[in-house]
Amino acid sequence: MKPEVIQDIVLASVKVACSDCNLRELCMPVGFNLEDMQKLDEVVATRRRIAQGEMLFRSGEAFTSIYAVRTGFFKTCVSSEDGREQVTGFQMAGEIIGLDGIVSDHHNCNAIALEDAEVCVMPFSNVEELSREFPVLQRHVHKVMSREIVRENSVMMLLGNMRAEERLAAFLLNLVQRLHARGLSQSELVLRMSREEIGSYLGLKLETVSRAFSKFGEEGIIEVKQRYVRIIEPEALKKIFKAQLDY
């Protein structure tokens, strides 16, 4: 057996300890004591590494697990009959991915790594079993599911009622808020997704996204250098986007 294959097997069998993870406050419920956290460790089967461009799961695949993103960025997307890709979301460290499969026992979208990433694999049967013992975990799962529903509804509002500049302002504000919750800068970010992927998510053409970025730059609202973005005037972005920010 090749050394790299052996290494992959070893990595796949590494046990994850939620109690020692610095992201536990983001992707796991609060209110657990040390003993509870040790039991929660049993929910997580393995860690799994996903290389940039690879799929974590694909549409139509049987649903068995949900995943906590430990490092890296993902996009979820669906394909139309003519082969076009529609981006439905972006997920980052500390967020749960894979809940789409609960309703039908099959995933209805593709989840693709935008950079080298690592996830904690949580078999859903383990989550359900422990949820019966710990109502706080069950409430947390319901909260995560509800947040996804709210986000989807807000995206529909974004696509239906807002101009291109408003959509991009909302996207940037939401993204930097989520990154700031993870201890990162409140004004600087590196976009892991392409402008074409941003356009797909926001229902805009690539050229329209590029024009909106350029306009924000010319007005001194943001500074853009390839995928690096610095928000110079956050209040100006908020003024462009007058609706709620937490979508």
Image (tube, helix red, strand yellow):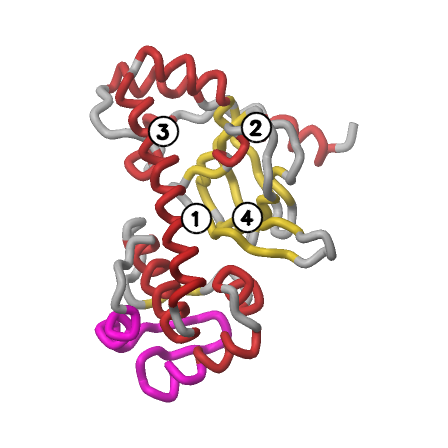
In the rendered image, residue 77, in percent from the top left (x then y), is placed at 58, 50
Circles 2 and 3, Cβ within 8 Å, touching? The answer is: no
Say what amino acid the circle numbered 2 marks. Ser
Q: Which residue is mark 4?
A: 76
Q: Residues within 10 Å of mark 4 (few under 14, many from 20)?
A: many
Q: CA distance from mark 4 to mark 2?
A: 17 Å
Give residue 192's position: percent from left, percent from top.
50, 60
Query: Label 2: which residue?
Result: 104
Q: Which residue is mark 3?
A: 141
Please identify, in this view, whether the residue under mark 2 or under mark 3 is nearer the observer: 2
Q: Is residue 52 above or below residue 58?
A: below
Element class at badge 1 = strand
Q: Nearer the viewer, residue 41 or 132?
A: 132
* Distance from Cα at disc 4 to Cα at disc 3: 19 Å
Say which amino acid is labelled 1. Met
Asked whether the residues under the numbered discs 4 and 3 touch, taking CB atoms below 8 Å apart as contact, a structural biologist would say no
Q: CA distance from mark 2 to mark 1?
A: 25 Å
In this view of the protein, which residue sits in the foreground, 218 or 200? Answer: 200
Q: Which quarter shows the N terminus? A: top right
Which of the pair 225/241 is nearer the observer?
A: 241
